[in-house]
Amino acid sequence: MDNSITLSKLIDICIKNIKQILLISLFFQFFIALFIISQPNDFQGKVILKIDSDTVDSFDANDLISISGLDISSQDNFISEVYEISKSLDFFEYFVKKRNFEVELIAAIPSIDNTWRVDENKFNSETNEWNRTVSSPLTVIPSTQELHKVFFEDYARIDVDPRTNFLVIRINHFSPELIFKWLKNFSEDLIDYTRKKEQEKSNKLLEFYFEEMESNSKKYISGISLPSVIKDKIMNQIFADALPNYRFSYIQKPYKPQFNENSKILSFLLFSALIYVLVSGIIIYLSLNKIKLNRFIVNG
């Protein structure tokens, strides 16, 4: 008697048990559909920033910069510096204090029509007090460190495109309203914070130059017309750092993302196909074992 398993034999088993396969698969599909529908929609938005690393009328002042004691990075590293600032705890603390979005970040839960509402088990909207239950080392009132961790681990991602050197800020969330708000505020505050840091450096350097000029020091500065040249060059550099659109420009501005229903449909189809394959495989396995058992009984 032929004990080999052929494709035609497997197909024949599936056809004979088609009703069982359909019924069992439909049963699981029903619960899969309920699960997928009950999940909040997942939206993604992004901002793309172009960061100009060039300066207006740059000049060679390495010696004076070094003796002034200032830590001024090269312009070639400015993009990397902005990237590190965007993920730093110092900038995030500045962002949180300016925008006060702690409740949105920690206590927001999905509501109807892709909106959000406050989880009253975490934050009491009437008293404006935190009432969540947490264990150490977390505190009832979220710390900056916790907010930073939640924001970057659960929602935000920042990258530098290796081909264009554009800074790409992405946010995933169930609320398109919060995505738009966070992207807009985060990008604006990043530009403002970085510009202020650059201005502080330039101002300190300018003060140092003026002090050297007033003291008529020839130790580091030489040349009759050099003071006016330095002044012009420094002022150009400060204006370049201070102008709102000098180093940053939007390639893609913040927007309110729209949900694509096809993503849930695709998930349902993939899970359904997997269910049909698993159910068919189990029925084929049981049928083959039943055939082997019957043959064993007959031969016995």
Image (spheres, rainbow, N blue to C red):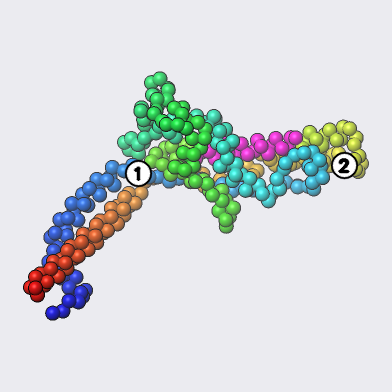
Foreground tag (2 vs 1): 2
**How many numbered marks appear?**
2
Residue in the image at 56% along x and 42% along y? 87
What span is colored magenta in the figure?
183-204
Left or right: residue 102 versus residue 19 is right
Residue 20 lies within the magenta run: no
Residue positioned 42% across, 31% down in the render: 135
The kind of residue on which mark 1 rests is: Asn
> Up-down: is 243 above or below 17?
above
x then y, percent, for residue 248: 61, 44
Q: Position of residue 241 (x, y in %)?
A: 68, 40
Rendered image quadrant of residue 208: top right
From the viewer's side, name the closer residue of 9 and 158.
9
Question: Is 191 within the magenta?
Answer: yes
- Rendering coords of residue 153 (x, y %): 47, 43
Quadrant of the image for the N terminus? bottom left
Q: Which residue is mark 1?
A: 41
Left or right of 52 on screen, residue 277 = left
Quick one: SS at disc 2?
loop
Who comes first in sequence, dot 2 or dot 1?
Answer: 1
Residue at 16 percent across and 67 percent down: it is 289
Residue 85 lies, with reference to residue 207, above or below; the image says: below
Image quadrant in which the C terminus is located: bottom left
Other-residue count near label 1 (Cα within 10 Å), few / some / many at <14 / 14–19 / ≥20: some
